[in-house]
Image (cartoon, helix red, strand yellow):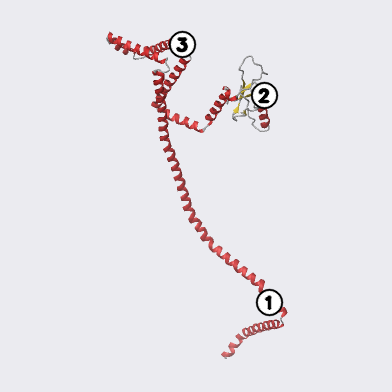
C-alpha cells in the first residue's frame, strides 16, 4: 500500500475520493471532512461537497477500497515505498487528468478539433486511421497474451484468420455489389481462378507465419511504417492548423491595437484644443488675481512700515505737530475761501452788467 498524504503513514482502510481518485486513510479523510464542515457551518448556502486535501477538487463521494476479501478493518499494511505502488501512479495519472480536463489549452484543442472535423474528408480520414491503429493495437496485444509455444500461437493465428475470414465473407455476401462480383468471378477461366486462389493462400500463409515473428516484416517494417505515417499526418495537421490559426490571431491583435491607437489619437486631438481654450479663458482671471494679490500685499506692507513710523514721529517731534496743525489750518482756510467764492459769484455778475 502507499502512504496517506494527510498523516504521512501507511494507508489504513484506504478510501478513494470521487471524482479525483486520490486515496487516503478512512479516518484521515473523515476527520478532514468534519473539519471542513465545521469551518463552513456558519456560511449561508452550505455546500454538499468538500475539497480534496491533495488537489483541492470538489469531493462528492468517498468509496472504501478492499484489496482482499479477507482483510479486516483493523488490518495494518506493511511499510513500502509509495512511488513503487500502482495506486500512487494512478493518483498521479488522476491528478494530471484533472489538470488537463480543467485547462484552457484542452478547451481550445476541443474547439479546434470540432471545427476541423466539420470537414467530411478530415473526419473520414481520422476515423479510418483510428480504426487501423486500434485494430493493430488490439491484434498485437491479443497475440502477446497467447500462452504457449509457437504451435499454440500459430493455431491462434489460424483461428483468428478464420474468424476474420468469416467476417469478411459475411460482409462481402451482404454487400449490394455481390451479384456483380459473382458474375465477374464466374466469367473467369478456371486456371485464373486457381492461380488467384493459390496466390491469395500463399500470401495469407506468409503473413500468418511472419506475424508470429518479432523480427518479421509486419512487426519490424509494416507497423513502424503505419505509426510513422500516423505521426506524419498528425504533425502535418498540427502544422497546417497552426499556420492557419496563428496569422488570424496575430491579425486580430494587430487590428485591435490599431483601433485602440486611433481611438487614443482621436481623444488626444479632441482634448488638446479644449485644454488650450480653458487655459486661455482662465488666463486673465489668473493675471487679475495675481495683480490684486500683489497690490494688496504691497499696501499692507507699506501700512505696516510707514504708518507706525509716522505716528511715532508725530508724537515725538513738536515741529511735525506744528506743521501738521498748520497744514490742517491751511486746508480749512482754503475750503472756507472756496465756499465763500462759490456763494458770492452769482451776486457779482449782475453788478458787472449794470
Q: Which quarter of the figure has residue 70?
A: top right
The answer to whether residue 238 is above or below residue 294 is above
Position in image of residue 60 (x %, y %): 61, 25
Circle 3 SS class: loop
Mark 2 vs mark 1: give the one in front.
Answer: 2
**N-terminal label among 2 and 3:** 2
Instruction: Compare residues 342 and 28 and report the one nearer the observer.
Output: 28
Tell me how far mark 2 sits from mark 1, CA to CA. 101 Å
Q: Going from the N terminus, do you reach mark 1 or mark 3 first?
A: 3
Q: Where is residue 122 drawn, in percent x and y?
A: 40, 27
Crowding around mark 3 (Cα neighbors within 10 Å: few <14, some 14 to 19, many 20+) is few
Nearer-N-terminus badge (2/1): 2
Mark 1 nearby-residue class (10 Å; few <14, some 14–19, many ≥20):
few
Residue linked to disc 2: 27
| Residue 266 vertical position relative to residue 353 in the rendered view, above or below | above
Viewer-closest of 204 and 167: 204
Q: Position of residue 105 (x, y in %)?
A: 49, 32
Determine which of the numbered discs, if any, sits on residue 293 in the image.
none
Residue under numbered circle 1 = 310
Q: Is 6 displayed left or right of 92 in the figure?
A: right
Tell me the residue that label 3 is attached to: 149
Q: Give the distance between the C-alpha atoms of the residues marked 1 and 3, in whole angstroms.
A: 136 Å
Asked if the residue under mark 3 is in contact with the one under mark 1, i.e. CB atoms within 8 Å, the reply is: no
Which of the 4 image quadrants contains residue 208? top left
Q: Is residue 323 above or below residue 97?
A: below
Quarter of the picture holding the N terminus: top right
Labels 1, 3: front one: 3
Q: What is the distance, in whole Å, between disc 2 and disc 3 at their CAs?
A: 50 Å
Amino acid at each position: 500500500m502507499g502512504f496517506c498524504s494527510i498523516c504521512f503513514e501507511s494507508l489504513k482502510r484506504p478510501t478513494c475520493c470521487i471524482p479525483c481518485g486520490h486515496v487516503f486513510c478512512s479516518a484521515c479523510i473523515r476527520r478532514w471532512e468534519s473539519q471542513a464542515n465545521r469551518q463552513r457551518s456558519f456560511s449561508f448556502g452550505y455546500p454538499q461537497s468538500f475539497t480534496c486535501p491533495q488537489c483541492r477538487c470538489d469531493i462528492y463521494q468517498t468509496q472504501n477500497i478492499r484489496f482482499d476479501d479477507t482483510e479486516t478493518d483493523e488490518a495494518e499494511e506493511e511499510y513500502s515505498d509509495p512511488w513503487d505502488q500502482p495506486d500512487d501512479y494512478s493518483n498521479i495519472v488522476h491528478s494530471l487528468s484533472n489538470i488537463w480536463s480543467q485547462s484552457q489549452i484542452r478547451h481550445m484543442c476541443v474547439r479546434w478539433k470540432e471545427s476541423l472535423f466539420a470537414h467530411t474528408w478530415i473526419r473520414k480520414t481520422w476515423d479510418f486511421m483510428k480504426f487501423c491503429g486500434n485494430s493493430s493495437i488490439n491484434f498485437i496485444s491479443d497475440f502477446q497474451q497467447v500462452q504457449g509455444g509457437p504451435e499454440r500461437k500459430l493455431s491462434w493465428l489460424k483461428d483468428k484468420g478464420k474468424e476474420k475470414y468469416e467476417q469478411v465473407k459475411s460482409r462481402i455476401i451482404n454487400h449490394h455489389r455481390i451479384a456483380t462480383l459473382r458474375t465477374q468471378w464466374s466469367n473467369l477461366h478456371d486456371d485464373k481462378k486457381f492461380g488467384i486462389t493459390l496466390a491469395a493462400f500463399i500470401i495469407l500463409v506468409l503473413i500468418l507465419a511472419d506475424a508470429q515473428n518479432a523480427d518479421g516484416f509486419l512487426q519490424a517494417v509494416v507497423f513502424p511504417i503505419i505509426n510513422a505515417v500516423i505521426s506524419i499526418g498528425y504533425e502535418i495537421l498540427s502544422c497546417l492548423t497552426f499556420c492557419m490559426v496563428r496569422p488570424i490571431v496575430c491579425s486580430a491583435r494587430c487590428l485591435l491595437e490599431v483601433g485602440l491607437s486611433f481611438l487614443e489619437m482621436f481623444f488626444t486631438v479632441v482634448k488638446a484644443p479644449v485644454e488650450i481654450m480653458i487655459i486661455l479663458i482662465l488666463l486673465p482671471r489668473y493675471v487679475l488675481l495675481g495683480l490684486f494679490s500683489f497690490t494688496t500685499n504691497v499696501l499692507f506692507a507699506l501700512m505696516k512700515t510707514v504708518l507706525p513710523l509716522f505716528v511715532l514721529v508725530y508724537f515725538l517731534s513738536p515741529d511735525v505737530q506744528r506743521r501738521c496743525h498748520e497744514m490742517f489750518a491751511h486746508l480749512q482756510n482754503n475750503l472756507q475761501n472756496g465756499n465763500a467764492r462759490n456763494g458770492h459769484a452769482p451776486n457779482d455778475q449782475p453788478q458787472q452788467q449794470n
